[in-house]
Image: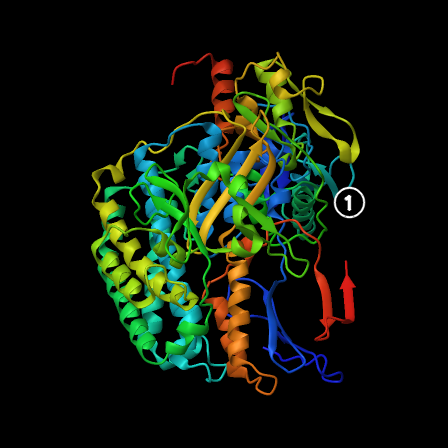
Amino acid sequence: MSVCTLRINDHDIAVPAGTTLLQAAQQATIPIPTLCFLEGLSAVAACRLCLVEVSGADGREEPRLLAACVTAATEGMRVQTHTPRLQEIRRTVIELLFTEGNHVCAICVANGHCELQNLAVEVGMDHSRLPYRFPERHVDLSHPQYGLDHNRCILCTRCVRVCDEVEGAHVWDVGWRGEHCQIISGLHEPWGDVQACTHCGKCVDVCPTGALFHKVDTSSEKHGHPERLQRLMHARTHQQWTP
Amino acid sequence: MATNRSADAKPPTRRITIDPVTRIEGHAKISIHLDASGAVETARFHVTEYRGFEKFCEGRPFTEMAAITARICGICPVSHLLAAAATGDKILAVRIPPAAEKLRRLMNLAQITQSHALSFFHLSSPDFLLGWDSDPARRNIFGLIAANPELARSGIRLRQFGQGVIEALGGRKIHAAWAVPGGVRSPLSPETRDQIRAGLPEAFAIAEQGLALFKQLLDSQLREELNVFGNFPSLFLGLVGRDGRWEHSGGSGCGGIRVMASDGSLVADGLQEDDYAGFLAEAVEPWSYLKFPYFKALGPEAGSYRVGPLARLNLCDRIGTERADRELLELRQRGGRVVTASFLYHLARLIEIVACLEQMEQLLDDPQITATHVRARASVNCHEAVGVSEAPRGTLLHHYRVDADGLIERVNLIIATGQNNSAMNRTITQIAQHVLTGHNLSEPLLNRVEAGIRCFDPCLSCSTHAAGQMPLQVQLFSAAGELLEERQRG
């Protein structure tokens, strides 16, 4: 196995070739905020929260902004994870996510257990500097057990990936383009009408916000369970099905 | 407070504006219209804020309604929480576990206690204790703290007790989304029950202190107020228990809605909240966001009614607890079987605090209160439901219609303050006619008019949820009814 060495902030690190910058940073216990990324699923670099400044790669010295979750470490890379520029970008990304949808934390099922909310605190978003768009979006409660509130969806596509890559049902997809983008079930049918759905609830477990939820949950009652996916993936990989 | 003699240049008509009305919950103004001789013709209570809850709840899951509607108000969120949860129970078509019903009752009693403590000690007592003629800059809670720190402290402590119970049950003092369709989220632990019980003796002592003080004032310097602060016949409406007892919750012990006339005759009894549209109607005036509900069968004039603490005490045969029943008897000796003096809303509030504390004591002694089965689960089984609860200010109705999946299609909220709207307008007109003349428009007299509103402890943030047009219309009429000037916006 070939190894490459790189520098993240002030740490010199050696990692196997092919390791992503996010994995390398985790190895060096350097936290990089993520939202769409979830261990066990493919990385799509949709949220842009894990952007880092990279120089010294491919002979280019000027720092470039690259998503740590999909950028492979290369020999001689120099990576900065928390510059003022990056902090500003991350706060702006969170503000864009909040203003683009209708996130009313106080009454949300995920209030207090929401990854978006936690990140807003982490990046210091005490208010939004951008105007709220208040888009008109609807709620799909047609499924017997679960609900989908498009107002709270940040298009991280975790649900799309877990349903396709892990459950193999491919109920979810992304429909439309640009500002009209939204998660769709089946061929843009009500969720309850999609026969491919196995009712497994993995999409609800991995949703980072209150967009996907159990219908019996009321305000603040939803607890996401991304760790269930990791346990499942570990069991599949290592064929260890008992704790 | 400002005096605007808008027609000084064109006698003989004048309009006096009190804007804003202070020490109430919300934003409003009062306008007083004088006739040619300078006598008060009419007074109007204008509610100038708009919320829009009934509209933006549309499209949301009904399970969120408790959390959303609780946000209508920071003073009495529990009232909306309980009414919304009760409506949710009916949409699920479940009977909630007995412990959940008792816990909801406990929270409502705590809510009524803290809200009444706020109204009496913080908002209204500066008028009685510092006097109508005192400096307006000091006629408030801070003036009260300076003049009577012990009483101010007691009021704060009593409110703290009520808020503490709400926090102990729901996890937070304000906007605890703890009551949910099907019951409540968490049971009461024996330790928490004991903590609540430990606070009761001090709360009883403060309530008794307030009662003794106010009764003494009524017997001495507040005699005139009894007669002119909204003393008129009207209907009274509210919940009563199955056996005629004082009731504050629409649960299993509730005997429905009772309507009583000032002479004590029953106009209607055992009315069910589900049929409210059959016996209640709402009139709309262009000069206020607040609607004017009335008892449909008698029309807008004769059908106007009062709700709230005084109505509840008038309607019940007895309260059902020793100390409160003793005070109820004394109230009736003071004001008759049906008390029509709106100023006695203040006394009714203090009596209700005693009733709440006694009933809390009974509930805490009930072994079932710490049962752990507190939530029934079901899916949508009913598409339209009406829930009812007695808020501190009166009867509160939530009416939801949902689609097959449980998404809200229509919301109607009938709020206590709105139901007292006609009575508030009649009260300020009566006070203005009694104390104001064209040549005597002093600050203390105008304050009396304002205080007439405080008798009802209105919560305008709750009551202005309804859709309506922006009522920025000012009209100036001559004594002959001729429109002198009109300005309109929107």
**Could you tell me which secondary element the residue under label 1 belongs to?**
loop
Specify the quadrant that holds the C terminus of chain A.
Answer: top left
Identity, as a three-letter code, of the amino acid under mark 1 = Glu
Q: Residue at x 62, y 59 (%)?
A: B49
Quadrant in which residue B408 is drawn:
top right
Judge from the rendering whether residue B250 lies leftward or rightward of residue A230; answer left or right.
left
Residue B205 falls in image quadrant: bottom left
Residue closest to the eye, A228 or B341: B341
| Residue B74 on image: x %, y % | 49, 55
Q: Is residue A136 visible?
A: yes
Q: Chain of mark 1?
A: A
Q: Quadrant of the N terminus of chain A?
A: top right
Using the image, determine if residue B306 lies above or below residue A120: below
Sort mark 1 into few (<14), some (14-19) or many (20+) by Cα contacts within 10 Å. Answer: few
Q: Position of residue B169 (x, y in %)?
A: 35, 46
Judging from the image, the colouring scheme is rainbow
Depth order, front residue of B15/B260: B260
Q: Residue at x 54, y 55 (%)?
A: B418
Q: Visible in this render: residue B414?
A: no
Residue at 38% from the left image edge and 44% from the top image edge: B249
Image vertical order of residue B260 relative to residue B133, above or below: above
Does residue B339 lie above or below A217 as drawn? below
Measuring from the top left, give residue B229's x and y in whole percent: 46, 71
* Residue topped by disc 1: A62
Q: Nearer the viewer, residue A29 or B340?
A: B340
Q: Is residue B471 left or right of residue A11?
A: right
Q: Position of residue B232 (x, y in %)?
A: 46, 65
Position of A67 relative to B484 (above/below):
above
